[in-house]
Each structure stands twice: as C-alpha cells, then as structure tokens.
Image (tube, rainbow, N blue to C red):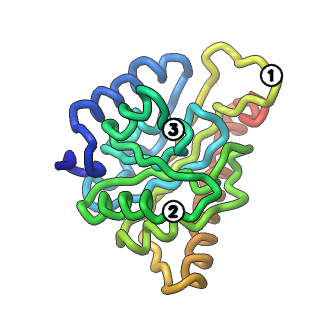
C-alpha cells in the first residue's frame, strides 16, 4: 500500500524524514529564499516543472516545496542503500535517453490520486535556462489532468573547476499555476512541451532580472 500522494511502496514517515534532512541539513549550506510558495495549490494533481543546473536543486526543492512531491530521478542514483531508500522516499527512477513508460505511469498514478510530481524536463544538468525540454512533463500533465507549477532556481550553478563560494545565495521562485490543454498524439505533446518550456524559461528570466535588480551576481558565475 502506498502512502497518500506518493508512489506505490513509498513510506509517509520516511518521506517526511527525508524532507526534514533536505530542509534542515542541506538548506543551511546555502542562503535560500523562496519566492511565491503560497502559489502552490494545496490539493489536487500538480506537476512541478523545474530548471536544472546542479545536483542541489532536487534536494532543495524536495525539502522546500510545501507539498509531498514524488520526483523523477535518474536511475543511476538508485544503487546500494540509496536504491532502497529513494523508493521509500517516494522518488521514481527514470532511465535517461531511453523510452520507458513504467516511471511515467507510476507518476501518473500519483497524479490520479491527487498527488504532486516533480520533474526536470531539461533532462540533464546545464545552465538551467530551459532552452530544451523533453516530452515527459507534457505527457504527465495530459495523462494526469494536472495543474502545472513552474519553479525556477538560481544560485546553485558552479562552473567546472570553480570553487564553491561559502553559503551562496540561492533563490527559488514559484510561478503562477496554470492548466494547459495538451492535445492528442505526438503533435499535441510537442506543442504542449513547448508551452511548458516557454513558461519555465520566462520564469527563469524573471528570476534572473530580479536578482540583477537586487545586486546579486549572475548565477551562472556563482
């Protein structure tokens, strides 16, 4: 039996414990400010789409978002003890670069139960500008009849070879929820994917502009 709002096999207490680790142990390594958390719907199926420029975003969002959230996580991390612990947390393993409906259908089941799913549609770490999207997010929104909440994070990116600054300032901005109509077939997914990409890219740009106005460095140089 699954915990409410989580995939099959997940443990509510372990999920809560994991969120506590992310919030009270991982977060203090950064100076984090969350903007717009009140925009997150309190109930109903939600797909969080987030940009991705480091391994830190999944941990921070897992702890900082105000709802239980099942994230799609690359399968390579599900090894050893973590391979047991992540599913108990409610995380869903996904193969990068492969067509695998099993994790998507597990996520759809969470949405059908009124839960929340988090996905990084860029597919891999980069500059986090949301320039390229995979179609999984649009599929989830369509299959789960879900509301979309874009989430932008800046301040976590560290260029190769650069040293991490002491407690860098990290901003997480939650965008306005919206419920797009994703059309049928491949064309519908492609059009829906582009709509989601634009929504997240616009939010990332808005956060970049906010940080610039407040005298914060370009996060791609943090």
User: Total label count?
Assistant: 3
Assign a secondary structure to mark 1: loop
Badge 2 crowding class, 10 Å Cα cut-off, few under 14, some 14 to 19, many 20 or more, is few
Residue located beneath label 2 in the image: 100
Name the residue rendered at 30%, 58% in the picture.
110
Q: Position of residue 30 (x, y in %)?
A: 56, 21
Q: Nearer the viewer, residue 71 or 208?
A: 71
Q: Earlier in the sequence, mark 1 or mark 2?
A: 2
Mark 1 → mark 2, Cα distance in angstroms: 36 Å
Query: Foreground residue, 35 or 199?
Result: 199
Q: Residue at x 28, y 49 (%)?
A: 6
Outermost residue to the top: 166
Circle 3 residue = 58
Q: Residue furthest left?
A: 1
Tag on residue 55? none
Name the foreground residue: 94 vs 181. Answer: 94
Residue 162: image tag:
1
**Gap in Å between the C-alphas at discs 2 and 3?**
21 Å
Q: Nearer the viewer, residue 189 or 167?
A: 189
Residue 110 vs residue 176: left or right?
A: left
Q: Is residue 32 above or below residue 197?
A: above
Where residue 3 sits, quadrant-wise, is top left
The image position of residue 124, as x and y in percent, is: 66, 48
With 61 as the anchor, is 166 left or right in this view? right
At numbered mark 2, what does the secondary structure look like: helix, strand or loop? loop
Camera-near label (1 vs 2) is 2
Residue 64: give x, y in percent of width and height. Answer: 41, 35
Q: Are marks 2 and 3 in contact (CB under 8 Å)?
A: no
């Amino acid at each position: 039996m699954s915990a409410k709002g989580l995939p099959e096999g997940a443990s509510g207490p372990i999920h809560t414990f994991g969120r506590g680790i992310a919030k009270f142990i991982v977060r203090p390594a950064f100076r984090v400010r969350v903007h717009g958390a009140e925009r997150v719907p309190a109930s109903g199926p939600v797909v969080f789409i987030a940009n991705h420029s480091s391994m830190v975003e999944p941990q921070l969002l897992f702890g900082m978002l105000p709802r239980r959230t099942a994230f799609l996580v690359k399968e390579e991390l599900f090894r050893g003890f973590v391979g047991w612990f992540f599913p108990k947390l409610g995380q869903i393993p996904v193969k990068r670069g492969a067509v695998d409906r099993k994790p998507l259908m597990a996520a759809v089941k969470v949405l059908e139960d009124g839960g929340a799913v988090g996905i990084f549609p860029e597919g891999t770490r980069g500059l986090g500008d949301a320039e390229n999207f995979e179609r999984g997010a649009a599929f989830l929104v369509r299959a789960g009849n879900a509301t979309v909440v874009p989430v932008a994070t800046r301040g976590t990116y560290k260029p190769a070879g650069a040293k991490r600054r002491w407690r860098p300032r990290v901003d997480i901005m939650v965008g306005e929820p919206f419920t797009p109509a994703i059309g049928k077939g491949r064309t519908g997914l492609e059009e829906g994917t582009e709509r989601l990409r634009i929504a997240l890219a616009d939010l990332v740009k808005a956060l970049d502009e906010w940080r610039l106005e407040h005298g914060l460095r370009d996060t791609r140089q943090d």
